[in-house]
Amino acid sequence: MYEVRDYREKMKSQDMTNFRVMEFETDLFISAKKDLSKITKKMVKKYREEIINYSAKNIEFYKSLVPIVEKENASKIVKHMIKVSKLTNVGPMAAIAGAISEYVGIELLKYTDEVIIENGGDIFLKTKKERKIKIYAGKSKFSNKLSLKIKPNYEKLGICTSSGTFGHSLSFGKSDAVVVLSEDTLLADATATAIGNIIKTKEDIKKGIKFATSIKNIIGILIIVDNTLGSWGKIEIER
């Protein structure tokens, strides 16, 4: 289904080529050194097909809200989703957006030395210059007032957001935004979902941060609940 995403106008990189690729539920907004629409479409189809085919034979992969046992003939992307779900105690589909973004992004880096992929609020990027990522947090006073400064220190980076107050992704919590950074975009996505489920009130921010510190390879986290925020790790926040 087509969805208007006005925020993408603000995301356009002035120093790169911007393009959009859609394939059923997958809707990617991409910035790269050149238009890579055709190869992106091909890669999206490939990885969607691997996930769909596995789900058809293992319906629990698609439906489960908790970790599952890996079955035979799982592809690399499916194995990766199952792995991070076990680390964060959520279902493997909690990492679907991060999975498509990262695996497509890695393929695109064969053709461009910089890429930014936004997929439903989750971002995979490889950058050679400092970038700023603005944070949307629903009705919070911090919404669109804060940016994350991303330095070109990483081979690849995932920046994933979960919210219990807006968006189409399933969350059992009430956070306005849980933003997680990791060099593993799937791990960032699953962790954001897991922490989002924990946050019911602003008093739960400490619980969310504690959970983040227990997960290896999480770089940093930002949690916003109403007009309260908390952060941890190697992140730079700019007002």
Image (cartoon, rainbow, N blue to C red):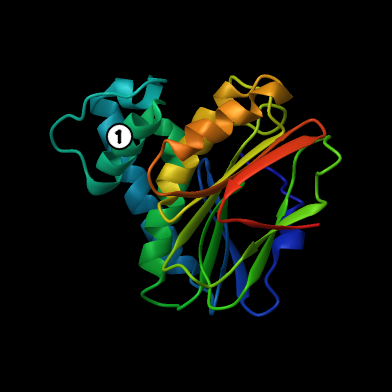
48 left or right of 114? left
Taking the spot 62% from the left edge, 22% from the top edge, the residue there is 173
Under circle 1, the secondary element is helix
x and y, in percent, of residue 5 in the image: 72, 48
110 left or right of 169? left
Tell me where residue 42 sits by quadrant: bottom left
x and y, in percent, of residue 208 in the image: 57, 30
Among all residues in the image, which is located at the extreme right? 141
Tell me where residue 111 sits by quadrant: bottom left
Taking the spot 44% from the left edge, 59% from the top edge, the residue there is 41
Q: Is residue 155 visible?
A: yes
Count of marks placed on residues:
1
Assign the N terminus to one quadrant of the image: top right
x and y, in percent, of residue 86 in the image: 32, 30
Q: Mark 1 is on which residue type?
A: Ile
Residue 139 versus residue 2: which sits nearer the camera? Answer: 139
Is residue 146 depicted above or below 223 in this figure? below
Is residue 238 depicted above or below 60 in this figure? below
User: According to the image, label 1 marks what residue?
Assistant: 82
x and y, in percent, of residue 220 in the image: 54, 49
Dot 1, how many residues are within 10 Å of its Cα: few (below 14), some (14-19), or many (20+)? many
Q: Is residue 120 visible?
A: no
Taking the spot 20% from the left edge, 30% from the top edge, the residue there is 70
Tell me where residue 198 sits by quadrant: top right
139 left or right of 190? right
Assign the C terminus to one quadrant of the image: bottom right
